[in-house]
Image (tube, helix red, strand yellow):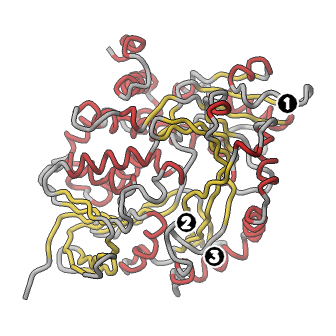
Amino acid sequence: MAHNEAVDVVLVGAGIMSATLAVLLKELDPAIKLEVVELMDSGAAESSNPWNNAGTGHAGLCELNYTPQAADGTVDIKKAVHINTQFEVSKQFWSYLTKKGTFGSCKSFISPVPHLSFVQGEDGVSFLKERFKTLSKHHAFSDMEYTEDKATMAEWMPLMMPGRPADEVIAATRVMNGTDVNFGALTNQLLKHLTSAPDAQVKYCKRVTGLKRNNGGWTVSIKDVNSGNTRDVDAKFVFLGAGGAALPLLQASGIEESKGFGGFPISGQWLRCDNPEVVKHHQAKVYSQAAVGSPPMSVPHLDTRVVDGKKSLLFGPYAGFTTKFLKHGSFMDLPMSVRAGNIGPMLAVAKNNMDLTKYLVSEVMQSMEQRLESLRRFYPQAKAEDWRLEVAGQRVQIIKKDPKKGGVLQFGTELVAAKDGSLAALLGASPGASVTVSIMLELIEKCFPNKASGEWAAKLAEIFPAREKVLETDAALYRKINAHNNVALELVEASNETESYA
């Protein structure tokens, strides 16, 4: 009887998650044998593609939904601080790879772009003022500036100020050291780096058709979508990092931990502008507040994007609804994901989120003129001919069991792992890509606990001199690491920062 091909690790999906984990594992154990399996004919074809996501470089600097305001007016900054330090951990990994000299240029995937928050109306201004007051006391946000002065705002965001009423009540904050990250370019750079090492393969046009437990791990059935041929691979560890397709694969594994999870697919659309005369007047990511009653994923923002060295503007998001779990998926994805174990939570979410359903329907029904009206809240003089509609990637928000409500819709990411650590899946969406490295480190600690605290510990400490918890509390260390990363990633000139990390 022929034996199946055997590897240490199979990673499903060639996006930022799998690429990061694969490279990390190869750094920790160069002898590890791994294979990445991808349904499309290239890497980063779904959520990691730069046109499928706009809010890249999430560092908690400008995203107002990461700093909720309580009834007493106080602003909770815990989430913003945590995301900021997670992004700093991502930058440590990219800095480490860049310094190796074989990884390629960091300029191809990360660019300096200021991050701004912009609010309108008395309530918005008082919230932003309180947010600034609380955040700027923390060392990660000490460079933040606040203004209600319109002349200053005209300098910060020149595209957005002409055409506004003279008596409009507005305010803004700015952090100059924000970034824009092209996660498509980064993913493909990671995959290229990975395949330059022995015993590391990326195979395209391959669909995983089965997951079955065997003695020491899993037998993964893989079908070539062009030839129809199928092969079985035995793996000690399997990672499901296939974006929206991770949920059906997790369900196919049958692990106890997968029970009760459902998915709610939401598609997105953006208005895109490539006119250089417009683009040159807006060099920033500007986030505002979601309209009253709108869900968190609807926070409007006008972003500078840098893709393949060219700058564009994206405005949105405009939500949409489809039953597909992937942009290139099937309309049967949602119905086929319904199980006896998750139908209760899914129905509870449907009942408790009628407002979300109405919101999605209203978004889908919008005309181009209505979309432009939303844009003109940011950019009053926007001309229709400069903008076109771009369809973004699919997001599958997590539905999970809840003892009180029956089921809840969760905005965020969730790592689901088998008890024995032999399989893990990543579900959910934002702020996903920007905090990938932290999520993959959590996976390594969860699924390879003995190695993470044993033979891999020294290498982990070399790559990551400081993790999130320390960065959140140690101001001097945060500044040192931040300055070092910014120089290594060519976000600032080395001479400006020599004292900070000497």
Mark 3 or mark 2, which has the lower sequence index? 2
Determine if residue 86 is in view. Answer: yes
Determine if residue 76 is in view. Answer: no
Taking depth in this image into account, of 402 and 9 the one nearest to the observer is 9
Residue 265 higher or lower than 24, as above or below: below
Taking depth in this image into account, of 448 and 34 the one nearest to the observer is 34
Q: CA distance from mark 1 to mark 2?
A: 38 Å
Residue 456 higher or lower than 306, as above or below: below
Residue 457 position, x and y percent, is 21, 43
Tell me which amino acid carries mark 1.
Gly
Mark 3 or mark 1, which has the lower sequence index? 1
Taking depth in this image into account, of 337 and 377 the one nearest to the observer is 377
- The tag on residue 396 is 2
Residue 402 position, x and y percent, is 59, 71
Residue indicated by mark 1: 163
The answer to which quarter of the image holds residue 36 is: bottom left
Residue indicated by mark 3: 406
**Residue sitting at the far left:** 1
Tell me which amino acid carries mark 3.
Gly
Residue under the point 80% across and 41% down: 376
Q: Quadrant of the N terminus?
A: bottom left
The answer to which quarter of the image holds residue 12 is: bottom left
Q: CA distance from mark 3 to mark 2?
A: 19 Å
Tell me which amino acid carries mark 2.
Val
Residue under the point 72% across and 40% down: 288
**Residue 167 falls left or right of residue 419:** right
